[in-house]
């Protein structure tokens, strides 16, 4: 099943976009982001390339690039067959290196670096199998897939036997779910209308545009001031009406008590969830906020900056999240994301991936398809984030139709950037930055 092509070339580049000029992506904490990626290219002895990214906000991308370069020795001269038939050991060679581990472990810069490398490995594997990543994954025999994933530190909440049983349950009607995706796509919500740096006039224009395109779920940023939050929430709710969903995202700016107070003030605008209301590491704080807001019908979403599967385990076990926001680059790539999806199913929490940024929409649509087809079997209670930025810089762009992600069909993990994108926005020597 897995190609015997050997990886003989490894390249990593720093690619940055000046999104701070337009305030695309701006929120209460990240006020001037320059959407960026560390971009990995792996090439085999047969001349086939695979691509991987990890997402950053500009400054510091060079540090991630350096960390990726330190992982190069773990990948070069290995065949795809050897990597995938013993993937758990390969993954641990990246995350459990006796010296590099000290810089994590399994978090921060070294985990961002791990994601870029493993994303490229999975992209290459899927390309060589001539399948889109989601299909490449769901067609791996369940026993083989379970053996590939690192389940360490999770045995107190789930066993590998239970995981095997869970993932085997849906095998008989897997093709039915794929057909549903082919016909209807995957539900999405849009964030592009509500960046914090946008004027009220721009928010109004964009919201009306998206309503006319058929969007029914919208997200806005909150957290700068009570007055601004109330005004902007009132504006968007008045435009989208009472039947459409409105999500709010504080991007970690509040303390626990402040988050509860502010959301009780905003409840009159019927928020579906509050995202990252406090520190992304504060499991107990999220649990307190979840409990306080439950009676008001407001859920808590988090995971965009959750470090690893062990942190997700705690959030889920302590009922500190009602929506599980996996990210395609924050944790260790495909195998760890699947582990987190399994945990979310175990605790009955819907997976609603974080996207936007550069290339994240391209990647996470694969994860939503994997969750539905392989893990949860559910689609009606979940959505995948979408933002309208920088898709044109990828060769396999995320496609939206009727406010739903269209099923990806091109081989790979959709990580490949166009030559124009790399030549223009590579930092610091791309033509844009040179000029």
Image (tube, grey):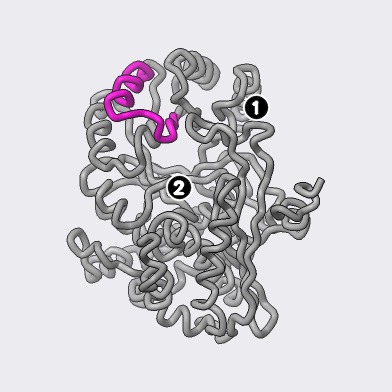
Quadrant for residue 164, please give it: bottom left
Q: Nearer the viewer, residue 222 or 345?
A: 222
**Up/down of 340 relative to 295, above or below:** below
CA–CA distance in space, label 2 to label 1: 24 Å
Which quadrant: the C terminus? Answer: top right
In-image side of 115 versus 299 (left or right): right
Q: Which residue is mark 2?
A: 353
User: Where 351 sits versus 65, above or below?
Assistant: above
Q: Is residue 369 visible?
A: no
Bounds of the magenta span?
247-267
Residue 168 percent coordinates (x, y): 31, 68
> Of callouts 2 and 1, which one flags the residue occurring earlier in the amino acid sequence?
1
**Occupied quadrant, residue 342:** bottom left
Q: Nearer the viewer, residue 81 or 31?
A: 31
Q: Residue at x 52, y 35 (%)?
A: 30
Q: Secondary structure at mark 2?
A: loop
| Label 2 with label 1: CB-CB less than 8 Å | no
Q: Residue at x 22, y 31 (%)?
A: 291
Tell me if residue 236 comes above or below residue 143 in the rendering: above
Horizontal relation, residue 105 to residue 152: left or right: right
Q: Is residue 135 magenta?
A: no
To which residue does mark 1 refer?
Answer: 209
């Amino acid at each position: 099943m897995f190609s015997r092509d050997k990886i003989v070339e490894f390249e990593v580049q720093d690619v940055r976009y000046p999104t701070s000029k337009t305030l695309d992506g701006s929120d209460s904490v990240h006020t001037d982001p320059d959407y960026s990626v560390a971009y990995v290219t792996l090439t085999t002895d047969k001349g086939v390339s695979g691509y991987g990214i990890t997402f950053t906000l500009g400054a510091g991308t060079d540090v991630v690039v350096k960390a990726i370069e330190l992982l190069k020795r773990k990948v070069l001269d290995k065949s795809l067959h050897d990597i995938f038939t013993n993937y758990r050991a390969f993954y641990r060679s990246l995350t459990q290196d006796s010296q590099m581990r000290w810089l994590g472990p399994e978090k921060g810069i070294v985990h961002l670096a791990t994601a870029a490398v493993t994303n490229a490995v999975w992209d290459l594997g899927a390309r060589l199998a001539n399948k889109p990543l989601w299909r490449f994954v769901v067609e791996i025999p369940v026993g083989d897939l379970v053996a590939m994933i690192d389940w360490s530190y999770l045995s107190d909440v789930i066993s590998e036997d239970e995981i095997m049983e869970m993932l085997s349950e849906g095998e008989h009607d897997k093709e039915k779910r794929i057909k549903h995706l082919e016909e209807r796509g995957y539900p999405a919500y849009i964030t592009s209308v509500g960046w914090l740096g946008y004027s009220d006039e721009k928010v109004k224009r964009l919201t009306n545009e998206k309503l006319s395109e058929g969007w029914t779920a919208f997200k806005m940023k909150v957290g700068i001031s009570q007055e601004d939050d109330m005004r902007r929430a009132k504006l968007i709710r008045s435009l989208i009406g009472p039947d459409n969903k409105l999500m709010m995202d504080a991007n970690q700016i509040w303390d626990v008590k402040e988050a509860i107070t502010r959301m009780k003030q905003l409840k009159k605008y019927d928020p579906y969830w509050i995202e990252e209301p406090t520190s992304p590491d504060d499991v107990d704080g999220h649990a307190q906020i979840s409990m306080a807001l439950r009676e008001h019908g407001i859920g808590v979403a988090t995971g965009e900056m959750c470090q690893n599967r062990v942190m997700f385990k705690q959030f889920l076990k302590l009922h500190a999240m009602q929506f599980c926001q996996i990210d395609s680059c924050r944790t260790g790539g495909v195998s760890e994301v699947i582990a987190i999806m399994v945990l979310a199913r175990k605790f009955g929490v819907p997976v609603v991936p974080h996207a936007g940024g550069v290339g994240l929409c391209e990647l996470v649509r694969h994860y939503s398809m994997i969750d539905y087809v392989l893990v949860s079997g559910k689609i009606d209670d979940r959505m995948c984030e979408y933002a309208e930025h920088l898709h044109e810089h990828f060769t396999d762009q995320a496609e939206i139709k009727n406010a739903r992600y269209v099923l990806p069909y091109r081989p790979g993990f959709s990580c490949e950037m166009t030559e124009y994108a790399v030549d223009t926005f590579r930092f610091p020597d791309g033509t844009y930055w040179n000029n």
